[in-house]
Image (cartoon, rainbow, N blue to C red):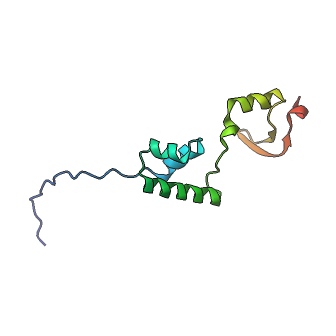
Amino acid sequence: METSDHIRAAAPKSKPPSLPALGDYANLRRGGASAAQAGAFLRLGPRAMRNMEKAFRGQVARGAGEAQPKFARHDRHVAAVMGQGGFPALTERRIGRTGVCVGLPLVWPEAAR
């Protein structure tokens, strides 16, 4: 078996720009961006945007990465709920020195006061 001491320096090849990951698109969509806004932000072409949206909707349909409604994080919504007593909370139970077990029942704001 012969080995060569001669190694050719390869000229650097330019890579075509890669598509953003579905996770990038999905994070924008879950954050409240429309499909068009997410596509524009990631500079997707029409075909790539359709494919990303189809894959994102498939994830949501399977329950992966739950989509949140835009209003649920809206400041006015939070202020209105806090004005009515606040959000319900899950009960907590300590496990050992550092562990916490979160579970049911829900504690409603009126009962917590």
Which of 58/101 is in front? 58
Residue at the limit of the structure toward the bottom, as seen here = 1
| Residue at position x 78%, y 29% in the image | 80
Looking at the image, which residue is at 48% across and 58% down? 51
Give me the residue at 49% from left, 56% from top. Answer: 50
Question: Residue at coordinates 81% horizontally, 31% vertically from top-left?
Answer: 86
Q: Is residue 66 left or right of residue 22?
A: right
Give the position of the N terminus as an image quadrant. Answer: bottom left
Q: Residue 10 at x, y = what percent?
A: 16, 54
Q: Between 8 and 82, which is closer to the camera in this rendering?
A: 82
Horizontal side of residue 24 vs 65, given as left or right: left
**Looking at the image, residue 90 lies above or below residue 3:** above
Q: Position of 89 compared to 25: left or right?
A: right
Which quadrant does the C terminus fall into?
top right
Instruction: Please tell me in which quadrant of the rendered image residue 112 appears.
Output: top right
Count of all numbered marks drawn on residues in the image: 0
Task: Measuring from the top left, give residue 31's x and y in whole percent.
Answer: 58, 41
Residue 47 spot, x, y in % from top left: 44, 57
Q: Where in the figure is residue 95, as x and y percent of width and height?
A: 76, 43
**In the image, 61: left or right of 81?**
left
